[in-house]
Image (tube, grey):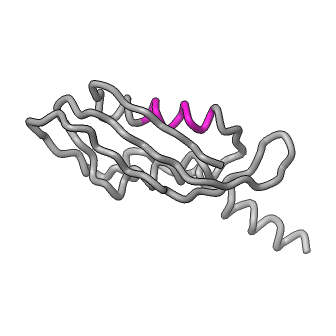
């Protein structure tokens, strides 16, 4: 029914309503090391903005901290925030990378999506 479709889109496209500051919720920690941090095999699903069909896969996010790290549970939440929008893989990859850059200002980082 139309009501079910509307509820489904509210859930599937809920990433537009996520507040990044609330998502991070102060889970930033000062560090004095520069070893690579990797969060891998983050499952995601999204909706193709061109075809209105789902796509899914796994995300791998890595960064080399400069002064701060973020709580490990926050990286999958950032991935989910961008996945739950009308998307294309290329933009989603860039949005995740830009957000990690904005929050942490790391020495370097990479985002890899496997679909």
Verify whether residue 96 appears in magenta.
yes
Q: Residue at x 34, y 46 (%)?
A: 38
Rendered residue at 60%/38% (across/down): 92
Segment colored magenta: 91-99
Can you tell which quarter of the image residue 110 is in?
Answer: top left
- The quadrant in which the N terminus is found is bottom right
User: Is residue 50 toward the left or the right of residue 111 in the image?
Assistant: right
- Position above or below: 48 against 2: above
Quadrant in the picture for residue 6: bottom right
- Relative vertical location of residue 102 with respect to residue 14 in this rendering, above or below: above
* Residue 52 position (above or below residue 107): below
Point out residue 5 in the picture as x, y percentages from the top left corner: 83, 67
Q: Residue furthest right?
A: 1
Going by the picture, which residue comes out furthest to the left? 32
Q: Main secondary structure of the magenta part?
A: helix
Task: List x then y, in percent, for residue 18.
Answer: 51, 51
Q: Residue furthest top?
A: 107
Q: Nearer the viewer, residue 59 or 67?
A: 59
Please tell me how many numbered marks the rendered image carries. Answer: 0
Q: Residue at x 89, y 69 (%)?
A: 2
Residue found at x 37% / y 53%:
74
- The image shows residue 78 at horizontal and vertical percentages of 46, 48
Residue 17 forms part of the magenta stretch: no
Q: Position of residue 105 (x, y in %)?
A: 29, 27
Q: Is residue 68 left or right of residue 21?
A: left
């Amino acid at each position: 029914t139309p009501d079910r479709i509307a509820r489904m889109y509210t859930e599937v496209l809920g990433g537009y309503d996520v507040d990044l500051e609330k998502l991070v919720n102060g889970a930033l920690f000062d560090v004095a090391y520069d070893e690579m941090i990797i969060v891998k095999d983050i499952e995601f699903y999204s909706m193709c903005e061109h075809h209105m069909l789902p796509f899914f896969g796994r995300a791998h996010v890595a960064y080399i901290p400069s002064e701060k790290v973020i709580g490990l549970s926050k990286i999958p939440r950032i991935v989910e925030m961008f996945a739950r929008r009308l998307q294309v893989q290329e933009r989603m990859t860039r949005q995740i990378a830009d957000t990690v850059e904005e929050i942490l200002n790391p020495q370097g980082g990479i985002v890899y999506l496997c679909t």
